[in-house]
Image: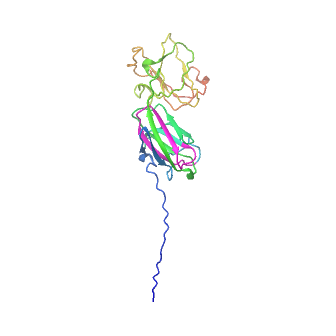
């Protein structure tokens, strides 16, 4: 008599959730090379690391992001993000600061893949972070590649105090946009009212006072939402080298867009706001 042995096969369905990316948070930011080498990343199962919307991010929902960091070796950064399975716009937010102490926004870029974002005015030796994200819904999250290249463009005229542009009269002076960043870093927290960051996309001007009176000038951005800072030094004792210019005699450093400067009738300047000018001495 044959015996039948019955086996019971128990099939257990296990649902495994995707783990969060290792660089989901600032403290786990991936160090990225600055030579254009591309690495893969993903926003799948990531969380939104920003408390509020930042830069050009679309104004709805959570923007799941991943973090990258580098110590800049140049004054210009070019970041290229190419979507794999990630859909919708690509969002890149660049900041400097620290995970514990907070950040200052240096710029953002949002658009279709491949996104080619250029950020100027970086400070060599400064640690930067940037996030890569895409807008909701979560189903749009996925893979991408990201590449970073930093460089320092050649020095252009008037980027330093000792090759400043000469102002001869009260006529308006137009300045074209530039990607050259700065030459020598000459503005700091000890010789001006600037709190941090130093020069970014700087332009120097020099003039000689021809008579006594009140100095007025206005910086009127071509793009009214741009924020300009400025400082004035008396270099009478060192008119060419700019090496002993000392402390600024007036300056402005504030997160304030639109016109700024020293004006006897500030209300008449386009887009004027109270930009907290500091007069020293």
Image: 251 above or below 49: above
Q: Residue 66 in magenta?
A: yes
Q: In this rendering, does residue 236 appear at all?
A: yes
Q: Is residue 108 left or right of residue 160?
A: right
Image: 276 above or below 5: above
Q: Which residue appears farthest toward the front when viewing the image?
A: 1
Image quarter where the C terminus lies is top left
**Residue 3, position in %: x, y?**
45, 86
Choose between 263 and 202: the one closer to the eye: 202
**Residue 100, position in %: x, y?**
42, 43
Q: Residue 89 in magenta?
A: yes
Residue for point 59% across, 46% down: 60
Q: Which image quadrant for residue 184?
A: top left
Image quarter where the N terminus lies is bottom left
Q: In this rendering, does residue 49 appear at all?
A: no
Image: 121 above or below 235: below
Choose between 227 and 57: the one closer to the eye: 57
Q: Is residue 69 left or right of residue 218?
A: left
Q: Which residue appears farthest toward the left when viewing the image?
A: 244
Choose between 82 and 117: the one closer to the eye: 82
**Residue 127, position in %: x, y?**
41, 38
Q: Which image quadrant for residue 187?
A: top left
Coloring applied to the structure: rainbow
**Residue 117, position in %: x, y?**
51, 37
* Residue range corresponding to the magenta coloring: 61-90
């Amino acid at each position: 008599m044959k015996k039948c042995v019955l086996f019971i096969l128990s099939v257990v369905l296990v649902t495994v959730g995707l783990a969060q990316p290792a660089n989901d948070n600032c403290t786990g930011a991936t160090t990225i090379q600055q030579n254009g080498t591309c690495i893969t990343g993903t926003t799948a199962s990531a969380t939104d690391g920003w408390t509020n919307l930042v830069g050009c991010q679309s104004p709805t929902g959570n923007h799941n992001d991943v973090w990258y960091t580098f110590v800049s070796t140049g004054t210009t950064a070019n970041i290229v993000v190419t979507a794999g399975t990630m859909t919708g716009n690509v969002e890149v937010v660049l900041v400097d600061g620290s995970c514990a102490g907070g950040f200052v926004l240096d710029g953002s870029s949002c658009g279709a893949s491949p996104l080619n974002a250029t950020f100027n005015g970086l400070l060599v030796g400064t640690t930067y972070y940037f996030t890569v994200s895409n807008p909701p819904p979560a189903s749009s999250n996925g893979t991408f590649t990201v590449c970073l290249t930093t460089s320092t463009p050649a020095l252009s005229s008037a980027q330093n105090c000792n090759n400043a542009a000469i102002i001869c009269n009260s006529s308006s002076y137009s300045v074209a946009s530039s990607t050259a960043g700065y030459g020598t870093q000459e503005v700091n927290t000890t010789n001006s009212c600037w709190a941090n960051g130093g020069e970014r996309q700087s332009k120097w001007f020099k003039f000689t006072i021809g008579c006594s009176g009140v100095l007025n000038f206005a910086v009127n951005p071509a793009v009214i939402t741009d924020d300009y800072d400025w400082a004035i030094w008396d270099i009478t004792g060192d008119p060419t080298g700019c090496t002993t210019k000392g402390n600024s005699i007036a300056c402005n450093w504030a997160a304030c867009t639109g016109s700024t400067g020293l004006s006897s009738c500030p209300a008449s300047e386009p887009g004027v706001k109270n930009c907290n000018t500091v007069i020293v001495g």
